[in-house]
Amino acid sequence: MSSVLWTPAPAAFQSSNLARFCLANGFDPRDYETLHRWSVSDPGAFWRAVWDFGGVIGDPGAISLLRDDLAPMTGSRFFPDASLNLAENMLRGDEEKFAVIEADEGGHFRSFTLAELRRLVARTAQGLRAAGVGKGDCVGGILPNRLEGLVALLATLAVGATWSSCSPDFGAAAIVDRLGQIGVKVLFAAPRYRYAGKEHDISERLAEIVAALPTVQIMVLTGNDATMPKCSAQSVGLDDFGDDGALVFERVPFDHPAYVLYTSGTTGAPKAIVHRTGGVLLQHLKEHLLHGDVRASDVMSWYTNTAWMMYHWLISGLACGAAVVLYDGAPILKTAEGLDPSPLWKMAQRARVTHFGTSPKYLATLAAEGYAPGRLHDLSSLRSLLSAGAPVSPGQFDWAYEHVRQDMIFASISGGTEIIGCFLLGSPIHAVRRGELTVKGLGLAVAVMDERNAPVIGRQGDLVCTEPFPSMPLTFWGEDGDARYHATYFAARPEIWTHGDVAEMTAYGSAVIHGRSDTTLKPGGVRMGTAEIYAACESFAEIEDCLVFGAPVEGDEEIVLCVKLNDGFGLTPELAAQIRRVIREGASPRHVPHRIHAVQAVPYTLNGKRVEGAARTTLEGKPVKNTASLANPACLDEYRALDRSRAA
């Protein structure tokens, strides 16, 4: 029996957005399962109801879903006659209301009204039009998470072009691997940025990048000192780009490309995922309004860079009338006295954040440091704490309710860049259960299937989706894009989306994510997820970080656990025995690692996800295909030298 950590107040079944949506469409707010069944059995009616409830600006057309019975997932089309503009829907509302809060690690804090944001977007959109940018063109960004990046994105959408962005801390090869695929015409870039107390000058790197992107005609530079070494493209400062004028929105079809996002690229060149204008808007309106209960008076934040899908997810809060926080810099600072975890919480207190988004790794660091945000900061405005990027351990649920706030929703959410949204997420009218993702997303026919392709409950299997939804990718950019897209998600089960997660549905309608399918452990041929091992390791004060993967041995596979220890600790036989005991008791005897190694670092992608596959490939003596997608590729040298005889 899973333990309930939070329950909604009775008023939520009348006043929450989800309850009002239920009642408006003839459903009982206390019967979510029936609502969900309707949303996937009649998806055309459901998504049209989301369009209406969200007050979408645009023409939906007469048809909500044109279903292809031969190819229901890959051939069906939502709103084939619709026209709309994503930026127009994000820039609506009371112009005197604050829309954006810009903050950074140094304590900078500035608010911008919707009127100010619209004026800046109008000016930049005029500059793009003067540069010949419109439908069919791509605009790129290499920008920190500040106002200029949001303005460039919204201006791109306003003129009907397609936006794609990278974080300025990406290496030149990683950026060229991504933006080089899509033929960027105008590039917005920051020659300098600040992170963890250090100034970083990337102007030379930008010149190298532009030289490798022959389609770039103009580079628009942001920042107070927007100077650049000579490069092949014309460069201009953002303040000199465009003129003041009316804000004009170019309406586009529902399936028109709005964003190009990228896979991690650790197994080859990053796949360029094309996302539809209407799919992005409807999916995010549904998730924010219904599942997140976002209101016009709310303030949303998520610690993210401009490349991760959570940035695009966050800024869609504007379409709900909420203000969004753009935070630039490190979430935790190093000082002479040790780590300072306060920057994000100081921001949350000052901005009166209602929805605070983060990651399990960040929460684990706070717990290890003994940092209690709820005691040290006024978080009385906080209604929802959200976490994404990896499974949240049961113990982190306990920590959040003890040290952040008791009266809040803690939503562990899971989806991906591929759908620019969530398959599993929170709800204002459901109990929060320890270690579980609360509900299946409305409009998403989510199931867990076993090796028979039968749906199962209470057992692990593959996370799948069996019916079409609007935020499925339009395609992968480039040659054979459709074929590569279909091979990635529909090869395992024709016309059924197989997501690549090992999951388990519970009897309560909630779910548990056990890890990625490509990192599944198979000792003795038994398939197991990695989440339980990570959760066990998080309980040790001695362990700063860890990585677990399977290594081939004599026709079988053994579990290898690599631990990065905190200063002052060593991997003693006693600690290794204690780790194995906790894993055995908290997971199962099969989860107990055969080898435990102490390492100096854990490999991560540029988007902050552990890379088990790269460590395994390196240990096997094979080359890792695309080290440009790793944040710290040099650390793999250590894994090449791991010796079983020296393991604990």
Image (spheres, helix red, strand yellow):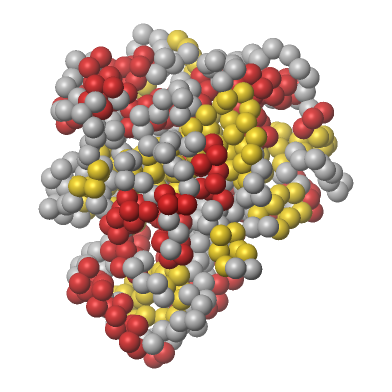
Residue 101 occupies quadrant = top right
Residue at 55% x, 72% y is 635
Residue 97 in view in this figure:
yes
Q: Position of residue 14 (x, y in %)?
A: 24, 21
What residue occupies the far right of the structure in this picture? 230
Q: Is residue 600 above or below residue 461?
A: below
Q: Is residue 287 above or below residue 577?
A: above
Q: Position of residue 346 (x, y in %)?
A: 54, 46
Quadrant containing the C terminus is bottom left
Q: Is residue 158 above or below residue 260?
A: above
Residue 496 in view in this figure:
no
Position of 181 with respect to 79 (left or right) is right
Residue at 50% x, 66% y is 603
Residue 142 occupies quadrant = top right
Q: Is residue 573 above or below residue 241?
A: below
Position of 395 with respect to 211 (left or right) is left
Position of 380 with respect to 169 (left or right) is left
Residue at 26% x, 68% y is 522
Total labels: the figure holds 0
Q: Nearer the viewer, residue 26 or 514?
A: 26
Q: Position of residue 530 (x, y in %)?
A: 31, 64
Q: Nearer the viewer, residue 641 or 144?
A: 144
Q: Position of residue 395 (x, y in %)?
A: 30, 59
Residue at 31% x, 77% y is 579
Q: Nearer the viewer, residue 570 or 232?
A: 570
Position of 343 with respect to 171 (left or right) is left
Q: Nearer the viewer, residue 270 or 577?
A: 577
